[in-house]
Amino acid sequence: MKILRKKRVLLIMFVSFVLVLFLNTNWMAWFYPIEYKEEIRAQSQSYEVDPFLIASIIRVETNFKTSKESKRGAIGLMQLMPDTANWILEQAKIPDTSLEELKHEPGRNIQLGTWYLRNLSDQFGGNEIVMIAAYNAGPGKVSSWLKNGVWDGTLETVKDIPFGETRHYVQRVIYYYNQYVKIYDTF
């Protein structure tokens, strides 16, 4: 009899815990955290890029882990290729930044990555789906896909992106973007 009573108490405690967890509006934030919010917010405002998009790209690229370097040589939170990073530094006229600093310094990496997203937005008329694809595959490749009718630049036709890596990348970034927008009221 005591065992049954203990099991009921444990069951009631478990159900109560689950109810509290699900009634808490921010419980999903445990599974979809956003790190470096202040840095993302500052760069988002500076370059007028959606902060949830920046966070989604960082989530897909490195899951908010600094000092990452890809097999291809991309560095930092936003996985910037060294040539692209050097080009951004020159174009954006950002002084005194080394590639080593970009690899280890989240704020600087987010600044350059966000500047690049702004540049891609300007190149592709603000089409965020195309921006995401260009961030992964490069603007030249994406421009040729659009020009040659391989892909029309819409979310509905992402399956037409000829590079599997880029197709999957766009889908993942959009997935995290949608999750973040649902979970967080504001950034």
Image (cartoon, grey):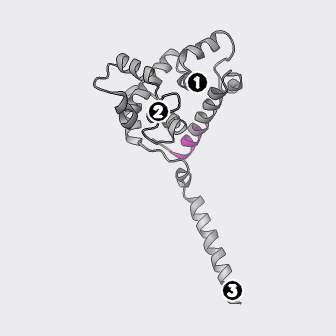
Identify the image quadrant of the C terminus.
Answer: top left
- Magenta residues (range): 178-184
Pick out the residue farthest to the bottom: 1
Q: What amino acid is at disc 2? A: Met
Where disc 2 sits, the SS reads loop
- Is 56 situated left or right of 110 in this image? right
Identify the image quadrant of the N terminus.
Answer: bottom right
Residue 102 within the segment the image draws in magenta:
no
Residue at point 58%, 24% (across, down): 133
Q: Main secondary structure of the magenta part?
A: helix
| Labelled disc at residue 133 | 1
Residue at point 57%, 43% (across, down): 182
Q: Earlier in the sequence, mark 1 or mark 2?
A: 2
Residue 4 quadrant: bottom right
**Rendering coords of residue 5 (x, y %):** 67, 85
Depth check, front residue: 148 or 16: 148
Instruction: Residue 48: tell me if it is visible.
Output: no
The relative height of residue 26 versus residue 124 in the rendered view (above or below) is below
- Mark closer to the observer (3, 2): 2
Depth check, front residue: 130 or 78: 78
**Rendering coords of residue 166 (x, y %):** 62, 26
Pick out the residue farthest to the top: 148
Instruction: Residue 87: tell me if it is visible.
Output: yes
Q: Which residue is mark 2?
A: 78
Residue 86 quadrant: top left
Q: Which residue is mark 3?
A: 3
**Rendering coords of residue 37 (x, y %):** 41, 42
Q: What amino acid is at disc 3? A: Ile
Residue 177 quadrant: top right
Q: Earlier in the sequence, mark 3 or mark 2?
A: 3
Where disc 3 sits, the SS reads helix
